[in-house]
Image: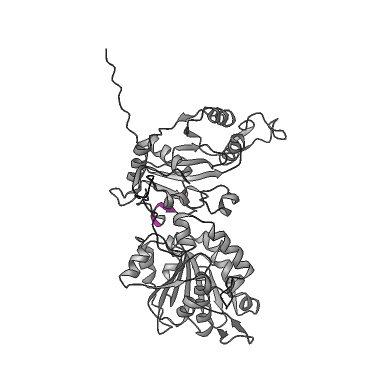
Amino acid sequence: MTAAVAESPVVQTVRYEPRGAARTLFHNRDAEVAMVGSAGTGKSMACLFRLHFAAMANPGIRGLIMRKTAVSLGATTLVTFEEKVAKEAIAAGVLRWYGGSTREAASYRYHNGSTIVVGGMDKPEKVLSSEYDLVFCDEGIEFTETDWETLATRLRHGRLSWQQQILATNPGPPTHWIKKRADRGALTLLTSRHVDNPAYVNADGTPTPQGREYLGRLDALTGVRRLRLRDGIWAAAEGIIYEGFDPGVHVIPKGTVIPKAWPRYWAVDFGYTNPFVCQCWAEDPDGRLWLEWEVYRTQRLVEDHAVTILDQVSRLDPKSVHHDQHPRRAHEGRIWTGPRPRAVICDHDAEDRATLERHLGLATVPAKKTVSDGIQYVQVRLKPAGDDKPRLFLRAGALVERDQALDDAGKPCCTAEEFPGYVWAVKPGNSGDLKEEPAKVNDHGMDATRYMVAHRDAKVRGSIRWL
């Protein structure tokens, strides 16, 4: 497929080879369309080309590219747009970047008068003050249905004879609003497959060298992550424990400011071959818990983790005698810059607790580890309260450092990634019956979360002494 640049200062041809669902998208005029499929099928690129070609061929139209958060847009979607979709047009001067102002949102401005505005639902004021012909929501699974319907009200620019709202996403659970909206016929769902991506699969169906490597990584995934990211299936984990967890509700934008005045608690689950997890939770005046940051790493000693933890809340004192030396304890020679935790709630390993206490310079308390009760406390917090808001949130970007070894192995790398695959264990044999206990796999963030919630929610029971 090619597109000539309308009213361009130079003659230029842009080439793109859409296949399968991507080709269908270019001929579709439905009001709501979702490009859904496995990771790496070219969904986002197809949608971006859709907007780019429309902007070049139709002078004066207005498009909108959205992510749930504005900061994630610049690091992902816009990189694809500038390097793989509009690179030649930018170099030729066909369009230029406008960084925005106090009155106008950031945008790409085309020579023919077309504009593509960019923004996030975390900062909607400027983008929602205008009108559009085309709207594209990348990583649609992160949006709420309210977000989607709100954006639909801005499709009234009228420079095209048709207006369209598009999203690209990997599948989620079958109960997600995108799937349910498609099932009732309100949204057209186009299924994108790896054979649709020329970068990974040749025209004869054989994988390219790059595709062979990428698909090999997806093949290493297990459970519900494989079903969604490799196979492109709308799947819920069998026997999922936290059915109420919804990333669109419980995961808050990365830029959300959590006041320093709110009390902090640290929840720790020890590990070396398995991940060591330290979560910093803030409690708001209404008792809600907010995951502010977390350490989630394998193959490191407790004393090394202590340094990473302290780096989040303190800095080295330049006047300290230990500044250019290795202190005997990690907390020595530091100035606190963040809130101190009211409690450090730990797994029960005595040796690791003692090491952590020595290097943090803080006492720890043993976690309440009754699994069944702890799970119920978390389930209650995930449900909407009287104001229709849950009582537990996780901040996007809370992870301090991503563990590449876990990532390469297709395992969760943070607490938010554990929720969808946290399931009840299956009883031995072929019955398929579930135990009343969770499967002990990829549950390290889940354990720490349970420790935290139980610490705040478990009722203190009075002891009875018989005389």
Classify residue 46 as left or right of residue 450: right
Q: Is residue 321 left or right of residue 50?
A: right
Q: What stretch is highlighted in magenta?
A: 248-257
Judge whether residue 383 can be spotted in this image.
Answer: yes
Q: Which of 169 and 394 is in front in this view?
A: 169
Q: Which colour scheme is used?
A: one colour
Q: In which quarter of the image is residue 357?
A: top right
Residue 283 placed where, x, y %?
Answer: 41, 41
At 49% from the left edge and 55% from the top edge, which residue is drawn?
A: 222
Front residue of 371 and 366: 371
| Residue depicted at x 42% and y 48% | 422
Extreme residue toward the top, this view:
467
Q: Is residue 236 above or below residue 23?
A: above
Residue 286 in view (yes/no):
no
Q: Which residue is drawn at 53% across and 50% down?
A: 413
Relative to 168, residue 259 above or below: above
Residue 200 falls within the magenta-colored stretch: no
Where is residue 262 drawn, in percent x and y?
44, 40
Q: In which quarter of the image is residue 333?
A: top right
Quadrant hosting residue 131:
bottom left
- Give the residue displayed 52% in from the left and 36% down from the top: 270
Q: In which quarter of the image is the C terminus?
A: top left
Residue 450 location (% of width, % of height): 41, 40
Q: Quadrant of the N terminus?
A: bottom right
Q: Looking at the picture, does residue 284 appear above or below residue 344? A: below
